[in-house]
């Protein structure tokens, strides 16, 4: 019974995609890379150090990550079920529209476009520039190309760090305008790089952690 429903949903999704002119240009690997790239953001590289400081011990930190992972998996399973039930382009917008009406879907869509994704893109670009500054000292929030100028209660300025962030957003925007083929290649490269970096951190951390003299002997747990 479920298999029949799945086939019908898939057929409806294919007809809708064909009617709207959407092209199925993403394969399973590309789709997986997009999801992984969306989940692994700048937060894991920036927040980890602060989380370690606040938790005070490796055990508490790992427990927090495990709980967050379970919550994330729960959300992913919910989205998977909803996408199977409503195989149409639009993602969360479609789910909210079908569940709560077009007004809520409309508000979410424009909020996502004007606030949520815009802020996320800016934050990730600034994080990239900050990390680049570790290797290239010229990229810094203190290296001003335009010195701060007072404008009412605010000061307008432009640093090399901000310029790099702006250039990165412009470059990736241009890349996506070149088409899906170019965009997915760039996405796959960035996702592979992030995943490899995290794998390296895990391997190095476990290698160093086996040494007895590196243990946190004064920690509350482990």
Image (tube, helix red, strand yellow):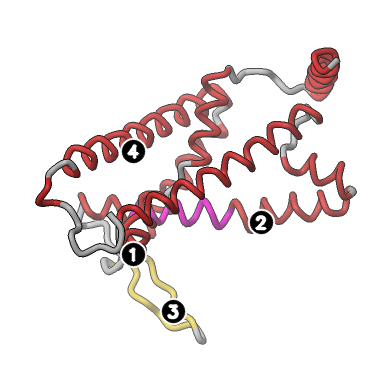
Q: Residue at x 23, y 39 (%)?
A: 206
Q: Are marks 4 and 2 in contact (CB under 8 Å)?
A: no
- Neighbor class of circle 3 (other Cα within 10 Å; few <14, some 14-19, many 20+) is few
Task: Report, in whole angstroms, how far the alpha carbon at label 1 lies from the one at label 3.
Answer: 12 Å
4 and 1 marks in contact (CB < 8 Å): no
Q: Main secondary structure of the magenta part?
A: helix
x%, y% of residue 180? 58, 25
How many C-alpha atoms fall within 10 Å of the one at disc 4: few (<14), some, or many (≥20)? Answer: some
Q: CA distance from mark 4 to mark 1?
A: 29 Å
Image position of 9 (left or right of 211): right
* Alpha carbons under labels 4 and 2: distance apart: 31 Å
Which residue is more in the foreground, 58 or 44? Answer: 58
Please give the range of residues in magenta.
118-129
The span from disc 3 to disc 2 (Cα, nearest Å) is: 24 Å
Image spot of residue 183 (x, y percent): 52, 29
The quadrant in which residue 20 appears is top right
Q: Is 127 one of the magenta-colored residues?
A: yes
Compare marks 1 and 2 and give the one earlier in the sequence. Answer: 2
* Label 4 SS: helix
Tell me the distance, in whole angstroms, between the alpha carbons under discs 1 and 2. Answer: 25 Å
The label number, if any, that marks residue 114 in the structure image:
2
Q: Residues within 10 Å of mark 1 (few under 14, many from 20)?
A: some
Residue 130: image x %, image y %?
Answer: 32, 56
Q: Which residue is mark 1?
A: 159
Q: Residues within 10 Å of mark 2 (few under 14, many from 20)?
A: few
Magenta span contains residue 124: yes
Residue 198's mark? Answer: 4
Q: In front: mark 3 or mark 2?
A: 2
Viewer-nearest of discs 1 and 2? 2
The circle on residue 155 is 3
Instruction: State which tag comes first along the sequence, 4 or 1.
Output: 1
């Amino acid at each position: 019974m479920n298999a029949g429903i799945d086939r019908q949903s898939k057929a409806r999704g294919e007809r809708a995609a064909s009617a709207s002119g959407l092209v199925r240009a993403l394969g399973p690997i590309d789709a997986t890379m997009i999801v992984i790239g969306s989940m692994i953001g700048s937060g894991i590289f920036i927040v980890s150090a602060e989380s370690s400081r606040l938790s005070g011990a490796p055990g508490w930190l790992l427990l927090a990550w495990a709980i967050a992972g379970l919550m994330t998996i729960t959300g992913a399973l919910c989205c998977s079920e909803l996408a199977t039930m409503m195989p149409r382009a639009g993602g969360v917008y479609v789910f909210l529209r079908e569940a709560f009406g077009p007004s809520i879907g409309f508000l979410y869509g424009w909020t996502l476009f004007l606030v949520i994704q815009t802020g996320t893109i800016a934050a990730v670009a600034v994080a990239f520039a900050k990390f680049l500054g570790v290797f290239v000292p010229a990229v810094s929030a203190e290296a001003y190309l335009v010195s701060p100028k007072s404008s009412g209660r605010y000061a307008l300025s432009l640093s090399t760090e901000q310029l790099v962030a702006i250039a990165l957003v412009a470059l990736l925007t241009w890349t996506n305008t070149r088409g899906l083929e170019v965009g997915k290649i760039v996405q796959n490269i960035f996702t592979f790089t992030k995943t490899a970096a995290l794998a390296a951190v895990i391997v190095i951390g476990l290698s160093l952690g086996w040494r007895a003299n590196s243990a946190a002997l004064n920690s509350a747990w482990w």
